Image (cartoon, rainbow, N blue to C red):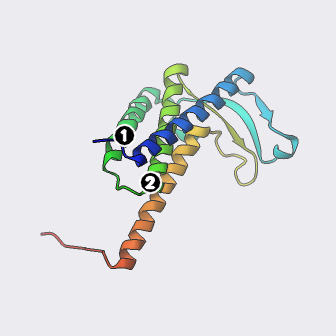
Amino acid sequence: MPLRYERIFLIAIAAIVLALDQVTKAWIVQNLAPGQSRELAEWLTPILSLTYVTNTGVAFGLFQGLGDVLMVVALLTIALILAFSRSFPPGQWLLYFAMGLQLGGAMGNLTDRILRGAVVDFIDLNFWPLHHWPIFNIADTSIVVGVGLVLLTIWRENRKEHRDGNCDVRLRA
């Protein structure tokens, strides 16, 4: 079965996310010491700064110390996205984009776990009400946005089915 354009799009999005994630993390590791912060611009400091921290948990610092388990979860996630992407309906570009974001994010954080033993986080939001928000990275952002877009896609499809009268609810005995 040849690759459809949508699957190529999914893989391209994942590759872009992975590259952007790893380039930004490499810059942070090279230019900041762990725990060090840097302003991007004086006017941006009340909103955002860069702070180098490492994370052995999942997105936003949750579940610290589960690195080996999370490596297995990331590998399974990557395998499932690639396997199930073959069955995604054609023409669902938003779904392919969302899954590409999630695939790239999973690959980015997995790469950190393999190469560095922990995930590099650096995006530090400083504005209220997020001034105590955990520090995160491009991969985390891609995963969260990807999940949100999948939920939006499901919601839109459900609305369309209801509007078109294609809802077929059957009780099974």
Task: Write the residue at 42% across / 34% down.
Answer: 74
159 left or right of 55 in image: left
Q: Please, what is the three-letter code of the amino acid marked with disc 2? A: Leu
User: Residue 119 placed where, x, y %?
Assistant: 56, 29
* Camera-side residue of 68 and 98: 98
| Placement of the C terminus among the 4 image quadrants | bottom left
**Residue type at numbered disc 1:** Leu
Q: Residue at x 48, y 33 (%)?
A: 107
Total marks placed? 2
- Relative side of 61 to 129, left or right: left
In this view, 166 is above or below 127 = below
Which residue is found at the position 68% from the left and 39% from the top?
123
Give coordinates of residue 31: x percent, y percent: 74, 23
Q: Which residue lies under the disc numbered 2?
A: 95
Residue 82, disc: 1
Q: Position of residue 49 (x, y in %)?
A: 76, 39
Q: CA distance from mark 2 to mark 1?
A: 13 Å
- Say whether residue 128 is left or right of residue 72: right
Instruction: Tell me what residue is drawn at x 73 percent, y 47 percent.
Output: 131
Q: Residue furthest left?
A: 173
Q: Is residue 61 visible?
A: no
Q: Is 55 located above or below residue 42 in the figure?
A: above
Q: Secondary structure at mark 2?
A: helix
Percent position of residue 64, x then y:
52, 33
First along the sequence among labels 2 and 1: 1
Side of 13 where 75 appears, left or right: left
| Of the pair 47 and 13, the residue shown nearer to us | 13
Image: 168 above or below 12: below
